[in-house]
Amino acid sequence: MSNDIGLTDKNHECACGPDSHAAATSSTHLAPVGTDVTREHYLVEGMTCSHCVASVTEEVSGIDGVESVSVDLKAGAASRIMVVSDRPVPVEQVRDAVVEAGYTLVVG
């Protein structure tokens, strides 16, 4: 559970632009109950608002096999995303989707 209340620095611009900021802090889509799923967690840098969350969620959700994407937004820090899929998804595909959305996948 996140303690982030969605506030951002007015002088900070994220990858989605200064006019796209909104108050929502996360987006969650649940996988069907009773299915065999793979859950992977990743860190993404650069997200600061609900538009950022929506952009990453849309791109990662478009990967073949992905059933849902959950984002724990941490404005000003690396945000955690959880990808639920019906089979393992190569990290390169997740990285490409995150980059396409305008952000950076943290690898470590």
Image (cartoon, rainbow, N blue to C red):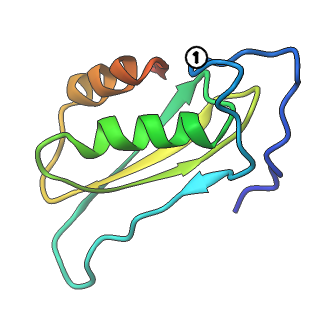
How far across and how far down the image is residue 8, in percent? 83, 32
In this rendering, is residue 82 above or below 74? Answer: below
Left/right of residue 54 with respect to residue 3 in the rendered view: left
Q: Nearer the viewer, residue 75 or 91?
A: 75
In this rendering, is residue 10 above or below 52? Answer: above
User: Mark 1 sits on what residue?
Assistant: 15
As drawn, the residue found furthest toward the front would be 19
Say what amino acid the circle numbered 1 marks.
Answer: Ala
Residue 43 visible in this rendered orientation of the protein: yes
In this rendering, is residue 63 above or below 71? Answer: above
Dot 1: element: loop
As drawn, the residue found furthest toward the bottom would be 34
Residue 108 visible in this rendered orientation of the protein: no
Quadrant (top left, top right, bottom left, bottom right) of the N terminus: bottom right
Residue at 53% x, 49% y is: 71
Q: Quadrant of residue 100?
A: top left
Task: Give the total number of marks visible in the rendering.
Answer: 1
Residue at 21% x, 41% y is: 62
Left/right of residue 62 with respect to residue 11 in the rendered view: left
Q: Quadrant of residue 91?
A: top left
How far across and how far down the image is residue 25, in percent? 68, 51
Residue at 73% x, 56% y is: 2
| Label 1: how many Cα within 10 Å (few below 14, some 14–19, many 20+) | some
Left/right of residue 15 with respect to residue 34 in the rendered view: right
Residue at 49% x, 19% y is: 103
How far across and how far down the image is residue 87, in percent? 12, 53
